[in-house]
Image (cartoon, rainbow, N blue to C red):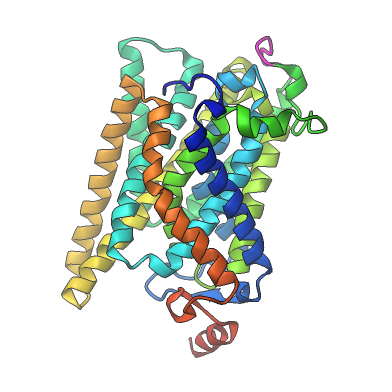
Amino acid sequence: MGKLEGVATDYPLMLCIYLGIFLICTIACVVLYFSKHSKRVVWLPDQHKVIKSKYSYMAMLACTFTGVYLVGSFPSELQNTYGTWNADLFYTLGQTCLMLIAGIYSLATFKEKKSTILNILSIVIGLSTSIPMAATTILAPLQIDGLGKIISIVVVIGVIVLFATLSIKKNLLVKYSRINILMFIITSIALFTTISTYDNSMVDMTKILPFQGMLNVEPWQELLVNPYWWYFEATVVSWSVFCGRFVAYCSNGYSIKNILKYGTFSLIALTVVWHLVSAATGYTLSFSRGPAIYVLTALTMLAFAVTSLDSATKTLVNDMVRLLEEKENKKDDISTKKVMDFVTYATMGILGGLNIILLVTGFPRLFTIVLCLIFVPFFIRAMVYSFEFAFGKVDYSKSGTITEEEYNLINSVE
């Protein structure tokens, strides 16, 4: 997928932009959480039905937000320097806050046509990084070269697209998300119980335990020195747009405070478990623990990739159906189904083909970071909106939220 040369300070403009978004979104989340207005409940009548199970809701957020980055962001460059947990510590905090802030803003703007266009760009750019990362991590331990590598890439991407399509057609995202979490737990146990069997010759053993070394300056230096964590942060800026729209899609019945609480807890919990088990070793070393362990980790990675593609495509299908119904001013089940099928198949086909091309030819990380700059204006508006929401400076009738009293009244009527 290409490399970054030098240190983060070699790219001062982009470093300041992505570091700034990371810090401001983190502050905005804290301010929102303690705001009296955070008790307002999300209610978008034409969106997903209320997901009453807290576990199912957190599983959907975790699988969509984390996607394949949690288990895939273990590049070899980090394994021999800071240890991947350092990069992912900042990355996880950053991705959580960015996606939650994007979600709050999306509640108020998801019906805007320009937001639909931005959503399309977000899906193309964001998943053109994350899905290839999943495929790369799955195939890396096999060390396949030549024609076999191309065939393997096509097969892996094809399987991801196929399962994501089936999930959308059968509306299985809630069920699949719960299964993903169970697979993640099982995989973590399997990795932990075989931790003494892997080849650790290339891993700095002083960096394996999570948060080890936090008493010195090393982790904080990484904010300004190590370019890899904010490369991940840059990609989060791109796919936070569709993740934010997914929050609007699945959060009916949850207050703003609940979204912040459950979204943050689910991601931090997954990250802590992962680093306790594997830390700097990553999935790329799983094959040395035996074929069975590799298959289990590969299936887990595949499952996370499927839910990421499913949730992204679902936001796009939702956008297209809503625009169609607005145009016709009536609900036409036949035309709606045709639109849903067309958008699903077109998105899967385009992303599948694009991901294969990127994996075969390679894709420079620096270009990804530059490309993600087009989403910065969205985040500027989102951050300003979040502070205004927290301090009561917005028109709440257009915020995609209602008061607790209004929500209870709706429930009593139903």
| The furthest residue to the right | 215
The spot of residue 9 in percent (x, y) is 56, 28
Say whether residue 286 is visible: no
Residue 31 rendering spot, x and y as whole percentages = 65, 64
Q: Nearer the viewer, residue 290 or 326?
A: 326
Residue 51 shows up from this direction: yes
- Is residue 22 within the magenta segment? no
Magenta residues, as a range? 196-203
Residue furthest toward the front? Answer: 12
Lateral position of residue 307 relative to residue 392, left or right: left
- Nearest the viewer among 297 and 94 is 94
Q: Quadrant of residue 361?
A: top left
**Which residue is pictured at 67% across the width and 32% down the height?**
86
Residue 151 locus on image (x, y percent): 31, 20
Residue 146 lies, with reference to residue 295, above or below; the image says: above
Q: Residue at x 46, y 56 (%)?
A: 380
Q: Nearer the viewer, residue 15 or 235?
A: 15
**On the rendered structure, is 113 left or right of 141?**
left
Relative to 303, residue 201 above or below = above
The residue drawn where x is 36% and y is 47% is 122
The residue lying at 51 percent from left, 17 percent from top is 141
Residue 200 covered by magenta stretch: yes
- Number of marks: 0
* Res 90 quadrant in image: top right
* Residue 91 image offset from top left, x and y in percent: 59, 39
* Magenta part, dominant SS: loop
- Left or right: 250 in relation to 23: left
Side (left or right) of 240 relative to 151 = right
Vertical order, 269 against 109 (above or below):
above
The quarter of the rendered structure image containing the N terminus is top left
